[in-house]
């Protein structure tokens, strides 16, 4: 692959000194007449986005001290400067059909500073293939645990190109909240604020959307996308303590008694996000591999079911176990409560709210694939799933353990 070459010729004595004779206190000289261009960076031509950008100091007596490259939206192009200042090259791809500003700082052999500012645009890549982005969730109001999602029309496996995708996705929130994207697989990303627990969520997600030749058309709205709008959730976590058989959610001055999974059917530990609210669900034991007619079989009509995993874990009404609620764990994995309490819970929570189970003998909720277990990764683990993370620690498995419905 060719390279975009920006050549800087640095000669001694091209900058004047200040009145005190110190070159370090001099105003930077205009190095325009000392810079020549080759490759695609030249007047009247668009740069090839498939080629890297390179800045070279031609004169061995001078050196490059700093290079910044940003697009029209303020997104930076990553790069690496040689230790001797002789060369700088981009380490992330350029976006297609974008406008960039390059600021180069130089220094001659006497330490006098030079400066050059250049703007250029990139053209279309050789491939006209477009990568569309679909965002989630849809427009609406969600709880504090709801992650943002971005699903690509085609897989992106190369780490450098993944970095370009991440830089093209812009997340805005009020108030501002720092966060990051995590690659769930080659086509799907989740965005989560950076904290130890679900904070005030982002309220809007926007992205340029246009992505050509596996590179986004940064700063442009080529691909229309629905931008979900969310207001901060006004409800806190729902926390279940399995051995204590109680849910740490107070209804007035009372703690709600519950029952969770009995031995062999333990409720998953960890943070789960409310996925849906279903007023009526038929639950059958055959969906979890329990033979019909066995001592563990069931076929129940369940009301006020708040779903927390796609495999069928709910918080729901369980009037048949009221005598055990608050005293013993007798369910097949769900959190059961009285019909009255389940109706109140159903009416109180909303999609995106948090349900956290502690001290169960069950496995920890998987991060992806069975709902939103994103918050079960600490921030360091979350950052490991980003292509923008400089050093990548070992990423925990993201494989899901999909099971059918439980009760």
Image: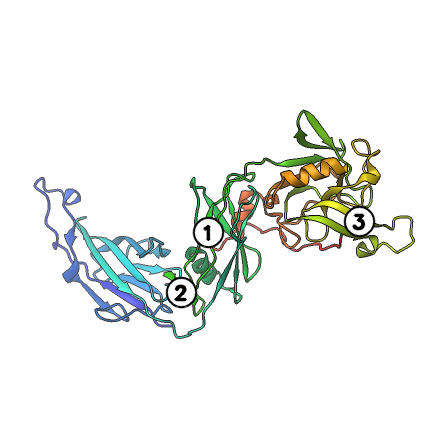
Is 72 located above or below residue 46 in the figure?
above
Verify CB contact (< 8 Å) between mark 3 and mark 1: no
Between the C-alphas of marks 3 and 2, the distance is 48 Å
Percent position of residue 115, x then y? 20, 53
Pick out the residue farthest to the left: 19
Which of the two discs, 3 and 2, labels the residue nearer the N terminus?
Answer: 2
Label 3 CA crowd tier, 10 Å (few <14, some 14–19, many 20+): few
User: Considering the numbered disc 2 on the image, is that residue within a helix, a strand or a loop?
Assistant: loop
Q: Which quadrant of the rendered structure holds the N terminus?
A: bottom left
User: Considering the numbered disc 1 on the image, is that residue within a helix, a strand or a loop?
Assistant: strand
Q: Is residue 357 visible?
A: no
Residue annotated with mark 1: 205
Residue drawn 14% across and 46% down? 27
Which of the two discs, 3 and 1, labels the residue nearer the N terminus?
Answer: 1
Question: In which quadrant of the rendered view does residue 98 lie?
Answer: bottom left
Between the C-alphas of marks 2 and 1, the distance is 16 Å
Label 2 CA crowd tier, 10 Å (few <14, some 14–19, many 20+): some
Residue drawn 73% across and 51% down? 312
Q: Nearer the viewer, mark 3 or mark 2?
A: 3
Percent position of residue 68, x then y? 30, 54
Residue annotated with mark 3: 301
Q: Nearer the viewer, mark 3 or mark 1?
A: 3
In this picture, residue 401 sits left or right of residue 353: right
Between the C-alphas of marks 3 and 1, the distance is 39 Å
Question: In which quadrant of the rendered view does residue 184 lie?
Answer: bottom right
Q: Which mark is residue 155?
A: none
Is 377 located above or below residue 128 in the figure?
above
Q: Which mark is residue 222?
A: 2
User: Considering the numbered disc 3 on the image, is that residue within a helix, a strand or a loop?
Assistant: strand
Identify which residue, 89 or 311, lies in the foreground. 311
Identify which residue, 84 or 222, lies in the foreground. 222
Residue drawn 24% across and 64% down? 7
């Amino acid at each position: 692959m060719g390279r975009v070459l920006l050549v800087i010729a640095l000669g001694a004595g091209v900058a004047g000194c200040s009145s005190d004779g110190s070159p370090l206190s001099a105003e930077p000289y205009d190095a325009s007449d000392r810079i020549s261009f080759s490759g695609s960076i030249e007047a009247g031509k668009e740069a090839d986005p498939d080629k890297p950008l390179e800045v070279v100091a031609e004169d061995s007596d001078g050196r490059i001290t700093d290079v910044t490259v940003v697009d029209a939206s303020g997104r930076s192009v990553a790069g690496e400067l040689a230790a001797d200042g002789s060369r700088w090259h981009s380490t992330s791809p350029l976006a297609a059909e974008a406008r960039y500003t390059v600021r180069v700082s130089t220094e001659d052999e006497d330490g006098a500073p030079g400066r050059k500012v250049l703007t250029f645009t990139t053209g279309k890549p050789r491939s006209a293939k477009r990568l569309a982005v679909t965002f989630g969730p849809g427009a609406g109001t969600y709880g504090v645990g709801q992650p943002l999602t971005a699903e690509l029309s085609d897989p992106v496996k190369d780490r450098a190109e993944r970095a370009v995708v991440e830089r093209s996705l812009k997340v805005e929130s009020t108030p501002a909240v720092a966060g990051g994207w995590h690659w769930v697989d080659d086509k799907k990303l989740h965005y989560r604020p950076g904290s130890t627990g679900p904070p005030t969520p982002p309220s809007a997600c926007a992205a340029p959307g246009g992505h050509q030749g596996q590179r986004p058309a940064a700063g442009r709205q080529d691909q229309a996308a629905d931008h979900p709008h969310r207001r901060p959730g006004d409800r806190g976590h729902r926390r279940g303590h399995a051995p204590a058989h109680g849910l740490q959610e107070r209804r007035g001055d009372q703690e709600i008694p519950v029952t969770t999974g009995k031995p062999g059917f333990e409720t998953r530990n960890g943070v789960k996000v409310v996925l849906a609210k279903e007023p009526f669900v038929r639950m059958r034991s055959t969906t979890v591999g329990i033979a019909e007619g066995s001592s563990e079989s069931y076929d129940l009509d369940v009301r006020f079911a708040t779903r927390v995993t796609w495999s069928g874990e709910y918080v729901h009404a369980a009037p048949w176990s009221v005598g055990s609620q608050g005293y013993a764990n007798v369910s097949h994995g769900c959190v059961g409560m009285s019909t009255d309490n389940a109706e109140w819970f159903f009416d109180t929570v909303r999609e995106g709210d948090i349900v956290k189970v502690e001290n169960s003998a069950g496995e920890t909720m998987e991060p992806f694939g069975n709902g939103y277990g994103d918050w079960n990764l600490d921030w360091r683990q979350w950052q490991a799933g980003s292509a923008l993370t400089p050093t990548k620690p070992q990423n925990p498995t993201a494989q899901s353990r999909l099971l059918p419905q439980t009760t």
